[in-house]
Amino acid sequence: MANDFSFNLEKPISKEEALSLHPMALAFIGDAVQSLYARTRVTVGRTSKTGTLHQEVIKVVSAISQSAEVERLLPFFDETEQDIFRRARNCKIQTSAKHADRSEYRRASGLEAVLGYLFLIGNEERLNLFLSKCFERDD
């Protein structure tokens, strides 16, 4: 599958509208976006069993792997994306991941919030950049 992945909203929302959403709402959207991207990327053009596909997906979308990816992606974040990341990372989170510590889970939420923001405003170029970078070490 090519590195570019295209799915978008019929009508993206404005940056101001997206920034007015709660950071965890952005993370909620970002989690779904990254999951769909990863599932599509590992499935299209392959005949693997779903269990094998799932193992490949969790290498990228688990809180532990997302937290590790943040180190690679932070230098690419613009000022707005850095702010969204910080706001989400610093939110009071009621739940936690099964296999990640609290700091990893918070950093993963920050990454998901950035992905959700980019999806909602329709910035496919930056969204694809970050989503594809999460796979660079595996390709």
Image (cartoon, helix red, strand yellow):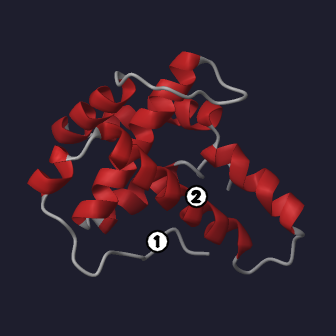
Q: Tell me: 62 left or right of 49.
A: left
Tag of residue 131: none
The secondary element bearing badge 1 is classed as loop
Res 72 visible: no
Q: Nearer the viewer, residue 52 or 76?
A: 52
In front: label 2 or label 1: 2
The extreme left residue here reads: 16
Res 106 visible: yes
Q: Is residue 69 above or below residue 117?
A: above
Residue type indicated by callout 1: Asp
Looking at the rendered image, the quarter that the N terminus falls into is bottom right
> How far apart in space, not on screen, are marks 2 and 1 (Cα)?
15 Å
- Residue 125: image quadrant is bottom left
Q: Please rate how many residues cluster around mark 1, counting C-alpha atoms within 10 Å: few if below 14, some from 14 to 19, many from 20.
A: some
Q: Is residue 52 above or below residue 31?
A: below
The secondary element bearing badge 2 is classed as helix
Which residue shows up at 16% across the image and 45% down it?
20
Q: Tell me: 102 left or right of 14.
A: right
Which residue in the structure is indicated by mark 1? 4
Q: Please rate how many residues cluster around mark 2, counting C-alpha atoms within 10 Å: few if below 14, some from 14 to 19, many from 20.
A: some
Which residue in the structure is indicated by mark 2? 35
Q: Tell me: 69 left or right of 53.
A: left
Which residue shows up at 37% across the image and 59% down it?
127
Residue type indicated by callout 2: Ser
The spot of residue 72 in percent (x, y) is 46, 34
The spot of residue 90 in percent (x, y) is 34, 21
Q: Nearer the viewer, residue 72 or 43?
A: 43
Which residue shows up at 88% across the image and 60% down it?
51
